[in-house]
Image: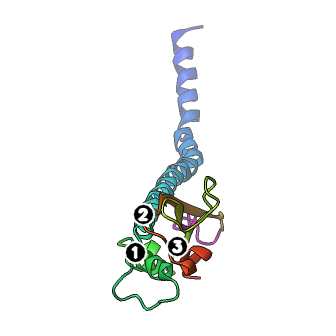
Amino acid sequence: MTCLTCSGIWRGRIREARGTALVELALVLPLLLVLMLGMLDFGKAFNEWIDETHLANEGARLAAVGYLAADCTSTANPNVCIAQQIQQGADLAELSSGRTANSYADAQDAAQVCISYPTNPATSSHGQVGDPVQVTVTATYHWLKYLMNRVNLGTTDIEGKATMRLERRATDTAAATTTCYPT
């Protein structure tokens, strides 16, 4: 084989390979973008879980010390006021008031705050000093809604929980029920 035929073969193969990189990019790029946006969305969901856990910690502390807001209108159950304060007073707009619908995502309800007094296994009581009070903050997360608003990839209830020991005795009304806001 002569050198002239070798170079002719290589030139022919180079001409045949022209454009394959563009085709490969067109095939792989959508998969890489979905993978990258999925990682970003998972990070956003994880951040929302951290925010909910933070709010639950604040609520558990307020319930543990028997905090009663000055503008509390619910005299029957003070936990309603604590749950309202946590849910409405949050600096986190999507958790406190929900999210309005737009062209990228559906509307999302506000986070729900629940305060309960589980039975203390050591004393078989609830609502007494030293017994646990548990606050749960739950919100529904829509996966990749900003990317695919026509395809429902599902939702997940993300929940943040915190439990603390009571420093003041809970009122009988508060300790007897699980209080959730909004209901």
Please, what secondary structure does the residue beneath circle 1 have?
helix
- Residue 91 is left or right of residue 178, and the answer is left
Q: Is residue 4 visible?
A: yes
Q: Main secondary structure of the magenta part?
A: loop
The picture places residue 28, in percent across and down from the top left corner, at 57, 45
Please, what secondary structure does the residue beneath circle 2 have?
loop
* Residues in magenta, as a range: 137-151
Residue located beneath label 2 in the image: 167
Residue located beneath label 1 in the image: 93
Q: Is residue 145 magenta?
A: yes
Residue located beneath label 3 in the image: 113
**Of all residues shown, which one is farthest toward the bottom?**
73
Quarter of the figure with residue 114? bottom right
Q: Amino acid at mark 2?
A: Glu
Image colouring: rainbow
Identified at 40% across, 87% down, the residue is 72
Identified at 61% across, 52% down, the residue is 122
Which sits in the foreground, 36 or 1? 36
Identified at 46% across, 72% down, the residue is 95
Q: Residues within 10 Å of mark 2 (few under 14, many from 20)?
A: some
Distance between the alpha carbons at the discs numbered 1 and 2: 31 Å
